[in-house]
Amino acid sequence: MLSSLTRLSRCARLPPQPRVPARWPSASLASARSISNYPRPPRYVRFDDPAGPGDGQPKSTWDARQWDTSTKVMAGLGIFAIGYYLSHLEQVPETGRWRFMDISPKYEAALAQTAHQELLREFKGKVLPPNHPVARHIRRVVTRILEANGLGTLDAPDVHKRLMPLDGFVSPSDIERIPPEVGGKEWHLFVVNDDRIVNAMASFGDIVVFTGILPVAKDENGLAAVLGHVARHAAERYSSMKVFIFLAAILDVIGIPFSGMLARLLYDLPNSRTQELEADKIGLRLTSRACYDPEAVPEMFNRLGRLEQAMSGRHIDFLTTHPASEKRAKALREMLPEAYAVQAASPMCGSTADHMAKFRDTWLQGGLDPDRMSEVRWL
């Protein structure tokens, strides 16, 4: 019976059916199609499109052939402005900092004259005459700093004008680097008799010293520290006022007198931190090359700081445009080795310090002895 059932099952086995390939559902097919092909945004295809209908990449914005007229004009102006700026950059020899200088010498001279007249009007009746003892003392220090560094000479009515620095004091390369804004190598000194103003300033060939700065300067070395610092700012104030100078030139052309206001602003403008640090360093070199004691520079700024604290918030003009701080005095003290090296390399500083020390000692001992006059040399 069992064998009959086995034979029956073998006879009843169905033949193998052909395998039907699996089909993706419609949704799955759409998903697979979307995965296999990168989606392309619709775009309008022109017959003259160089990219062709099969290229969907956007056009490059740096292709000048695709720019319109306004874009080309703006690009041209930008290139011109960059080229003009780069062509008018000059490097400060002492520090290596780059600055922008572009005002014409003609307008520069006119603005310098305007600034000079403004000073005459503002300080009328307060300027000490050149033969005043205080004015002569300040004039001697200023002359020594200017001539020792090849920066020019003072316009003194009773002194022969020397338009070139003394032989051997500066190299020809230093003379060629004298900036044009120093006033054509001829400076004017204003000593203003006002003890309430503790300030000194310089710009466009004019140096203004108020008698109120003299107690802070303390002696000739301290005064040299002040004057060496402010003389350096003559160029920096000029370069920092480019926009205002350009505006003044335009207003003067159309009949609006703005030069006088600009000239006043040149003296009242506070200096940036970069300008201050640069003026500190270069002013120390100017003072050292003129054979003044370099250590007097940080000491002078320390006295200014103490004066500011003692006056408890009162307005000090010099600190408004030349802010004093302990950090600046410390930085100046760190520069002293370099300053002494500059002084030692100066041909005019061979025995100046010894003679000044002898003069100071003789004076403190009760005056000059006729028998010891040969030991003292007037500078």
Image: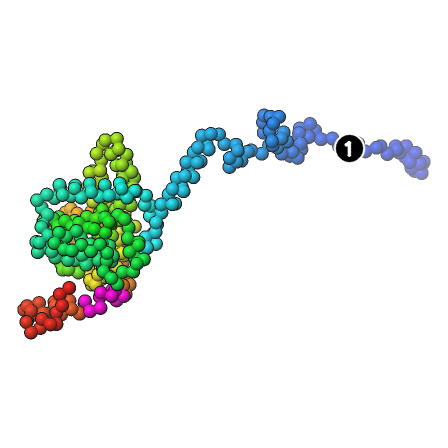
Q: Dot 1, crowdedness within 10 Å: few (<14), some or many (≥20)?
A: few
Which residue bears the numbered disc 1? 21
Residue at coordinates 34% horizontally, 51% vertically from top-left?
A: 91
**What kind of residue is marked 1?**
Pro
Judge whether 182 appears above or below 19 on screen: below
How many marks on residues?
A: 1
Q: Which residue range is magenta in the image?
A: 343-352
Judge whether 42 appears above or below 236 on screen: above
Check residue 262 for magenta coloring: no
Residue 75 visible somewhere in the drawing: yes
Q: In this view, does 90 lie to the left or right of 107?
A: right
**Quadrant, the N terminus:** top right
Question: How far across and how far down the image is residue 363, in percent?
Answer: 8, 67
Question: How far across and how far down the image is residue 272, in percent?
Answer: 27, 47
Question: How far across and how far down the image is residue 232, in percent?
Answer: 24, 52
Residue at coordinates 66% horizontally, 35% vertically from top-left?
A: 36
